[in-house]
Image: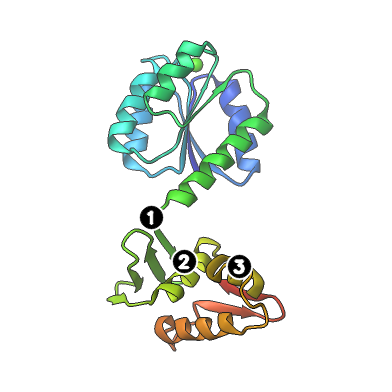
Amino acid sequence: MNILLVEDEDKIASFMTKGLAAEGHQVERVSTVADALATSASFDFDVILLDLMLPDAHGRDALKAIRTTKPEVPVIVVSALGQIEDKVELLDLGATDYLVKPFAFAELAARVRAAGRQIQASSRVLCSAGISLDTKTRVVRRGDGPGIDLPSREYQLLEYLMRHAGQVLSRQQLLDAVWGIGFDTDSNVVDVYVSYLRRKLDDPRESPVIETVRGAGYRVRA
Ligand code: CA
């Protein structure tokens, strides 16, 4: 994930940046509220880690401004201020989470992962393999093309595959998720519906949106 780290203490910033980079994240670090606002306005971040005692202002000012411009981005406050009142104030202002310094890196990493899962679960438009799927309007498109009309079950199957893009899902997993647990497991209904979807989604000049993984199941390219 792309992480904006707002932290004025070099030692802590370097400890956090190294650890997060080792977890596979890209970290952009700034040390003031002014820079936090400028950077968060110009670039999209998946998570913002926000210190409170900053040289030019209190981190709450950054949080308030970010909540106006980017209401969806998770903001995890990481501060030495550990009083209940501090936590309540920042959480009420829209902080996603609050971690008190000093903290164990493993806990920070876990909280960043949890924030990442939340974004995934709430993200409205899923995009993979050249297909976009809007989970609110249920409009499915290939590239900029027109909406592709999918009956409910085909839509549900595609949404489930796209929510797990890159993962191989067995026929049984797909049956349980889309048709419900207890559905006849000998049935080839999954294969039939995958073929319906392929007819509607695939462009013959490109590799298929839904790949068959021999002996394992199906996967949508991430
Ligand atoms: Ca500080």
Neighbour tally class for label 1: few under 14, some 14-19, many 20 plus, Cα within 10 Å: some
Q: Would you say the beta carbon of the disc 2 residue lies within 8 angstroms of ligand 1?
A: no
| Element at label 1 | loop
Q: CA distance from mark 1 to mark 3?
A: 23 Å
Vertical position of residue 57 compared to residue 17: above or below: above
Q: CA distance from mark 3 to mark 2?
A: 14 Å
| Element at label 2 | helix
Q: Amino acid at mark 3?
A: Asp
| Element at label 3 | helix
Q: Amino acid at mark 1?
A: Arg
Vertical position of residue 37 compared to residue 184: above or below: above
Residue under label 3: 176
User: Which of the labelled discs sits on residue 124, or is there none?
Assistant: 1
User: Which of the labelled discs sits on residue 159, or is there none?
Assistant: 2
- Coordinates of residue 86 in the picture (x, y in percent): 46, 14
Q: Residue 199 lies in what quarter of the image?
A: bottom left
